[in-house]
Image (tube, helix red, strand yellow):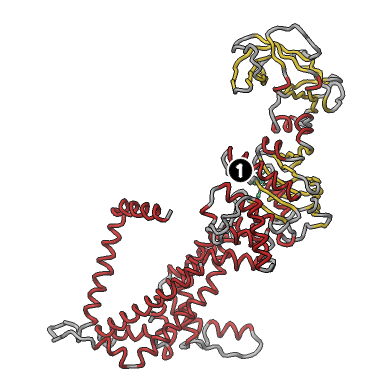
Amino acid sequence: MAGVKVSNVSRSFGAHKALDDVSIDFADGGFYALLGPSGSGKTTLLRQIAGFDFPDSGRIAIGGESVERVPVEKRRIGMVFQNYALFPNMSVADNVAFGLSVRGESKAVIATEVQRALDLVQLGKLGARRPHQLSGGQRQRVALARAIVTKPRVLLLDEPLGALDKALRVDMQIELKRIQREIGITTIFVTHDQEEALTMSDRIGILRDGRLVQEGPPEEIYDRPKSEFAATFLGDANIFRGDATGNGIRLPDGTAIAADVGDRLAAGAKASCAVRPERIRIATNAEAADGQANMLKGQVSKRIFAGNNSTYFVERGGQTLKVIVQNTGADRLAEGQEVVLRWSPQSTVLIAAS
Amino acid sequence: MAVEGAVASRSGLRSALPLLAPAYLWLTVAIFLPLSAMVFFSFMTDLPLAGKPWAFTLGNYAAFFSQSLYLTLLLASLRLGLEVTLWCVVIGYPAAYVLAKVLKGRSREAIFLLVILPFWSNGLVRIFSWAMVLREGGILDTAANAVLPFKINIDLMYSYPAVIIGLVHSYVPYMVLTCYLTLQAIDDSLIEAGRSLGASRLQVLRRVIIPLSLPGLVAGAALIFVPVVGSFMEPRILGGRTGTFYGTVIEDQFVAVFNWPLGAALSFILLAVVLVILAIASPVLKRAA
Ligand SMILES: Nc1ncnc2c1ncn2[C@@H]1O[C@H](COP(=O)(O)OP(=O)(O)O)[C@@H](O)[C@H]1O
Ligand SMILES: [Mg+2]
């Protein structure tokens, strides 16, 4: 096991900067999610760490050892591909045995290790099958067993669950997390699914256009996004834009919004505020201010009922705000109704305009 | 699984029948009829031309066994087929690999065209071009002497190597094409997966790429071996006196000696031998794949 340190790595394809000065510390034994929209450079970053591709500049170290010019096969990494990449000419057991066998391990060692790895992914009885006789989820498990049987220093996964349907994906998320805990391997997990990143990882790095936008534990990124992009890409957010006032912003129509979270910005600078939909309280009247200092009036334009909660879309000054209300059995609001929205400055993140 | 597959392919065959019919009709007319005529000839004493008397005989087949020359020539031809096939593998497989896995875009198209070119050129033109290159004082000889500081004498014309060179050049595109098709179907992520598991490029080649492209190698080998064993044009023109093979003897029967029945019988013996060889080889190769 080892940590991975990526320092100032850049990689261009022609004029296109796929990675632009990216630095991330992947802690030893941690589960790290790389999150970003398609084309943001996630795969490219993973391939630099794996050694399939080499950076134009910057440094990559695995377990303190500099590896920029070390070829893949010498890096002792395990990789799981989105399409599984199982060898179709080999049985499941031979697929898993591949890494041990090219290393020249004895037949006895290979047999025990392969069986242990297959047991770990709960496929102990399917060793004799061919990959094409397995379901998607089973193939994924074989790919995982094959990647970890060699005891690599780092486990790299490129959207490993992307090809699975929703229910199976949730199962595999739990399974993957269990296996990762069990063997304690440093894991770097590429995904474009924000929910997956939030639930599985202990740190998240958000990439956009080859740059690392923000990096930290899921709670921190969710509660204190540093950019509009981070706020809207990881979870949902209502964004207000205006001029910084010192303790919040003033909207173009003069309404003040107080923000206690985020950067302190000089008064007058262009700035935004982000508020999560579940932090806003919605009511039909303006009474009972109860410390919820921020208040806006609007009109419900649409309600989407989702069982345990409802999402209200509220029109206000040409902007549609989103409010999520838990289903507590209280009266539901009708579309077209005039409403008052309230939320606290502690739920409001001040973000410098980008 | 297997049963389902069989049922599916049977019903698939039924719906494909109208599409296959023209092909079968063509096969019947173009191959089956002339071939049956040849089978008929091979059992005759003489061609039924100009009212000449003829009778049925097994003599044409017996001739093969009564003269050791035919067997010697057949073995020489089989060896020729094997050697040419091996050279085609040695040259064609790496070329196909580079085409499928290394080159991209424009350069791939350009090289592909170069590989296909011999296909589109006339066989005789191709062979006589080689004659110009290989003979003493020819292109190869002149070029070598222009570059090298000492005098050497290259005269490959009318030799076994010349026959090999000519045949390999004619048939290597088959190997490149069949191998290219199977190699191209191998997902690059399989190669990367192998390397991420600690395998060197060579180990990935040996354990993943070659096994997965074996069907292409086998198809290419069959496409080359069979016609080369019966070839006559290259041996005759490039081999000269050394170029007597089973194929040239058959050709002689048809165009020089006018003993069609013997030529036909010798052809069918060759066909039988080749089929037996393929039948023996196919399970071995299937197991390897
Ligand atoms: N081998 C390559 N050649 C040219 N462009 C590439 C190559 N690999 C990636 N790119 C480009 O780099 C950018 C980032 O790609 P990638 O890392 O695959 O994104 P992601 O995995 O986040 O979807 C994309 O715009 C992609 O087109
Ligand atoms: Mg990707």
Foreground pick, A146 / B122? A146
The picture quadrant where one finds residue B277 is bottom left
Tell me residue A244's x, y (percent). Answer: 82, 21
Q: Is residue B158 above or below residue A285?
A: below
Numbered circles on residues, count = 1
Q: Residue at x 75, y 6 (%)?
A: A287
Tell me residue A27's x, y (percent). Answer: 81, 46
Q: Is residue B271 visible?
A: yes
Picture quarter with the N terminus of chain A? bottom right
Tell me residue A100's x, y (percent). Answer: 68, 63
- How many C-alpha atoms fall within 10 Å of the one at disc 1: few (<14), some, or many (≥20)? some
Foreground pick, B289 / B60? B289
The picture quadrant where one finds residue B32 is bottom left
Query: B157 left or right of B38?
Result: right
Foreground pick, A15 / B82? B82
Q: Residue at x 79, y 54 (%)?
A: A62
In this figure, which residue is indicated by the disc labeled 1?
A: A162
Chain of the residue where label 1 is placed in the rendered structure = A
Tell me residue B248's x, y (percent). Answer: 36, 84
Q: Amino acid at mark 1?
A: Gly
Picture quarter with the C terminus of chain A? top right
Q: Is residue B199 above or below residue A322?
A: below
Task: Give the secondary structure at mark 1.
Answer: loop
Q: Residue at x 82, y 54 (%)?
A: A63
Query: A183 left or right of A336?
Result: right
Q: Is residue B285 above or below residue A206?
A: below
Q: Is residue A41 visible?
A: no
Task: Kindly tell me whether mark 1's CB lies below 8 Å from ligand 2.
Answer: no
Q: Is residue B116 above or below residue A232?
A: below
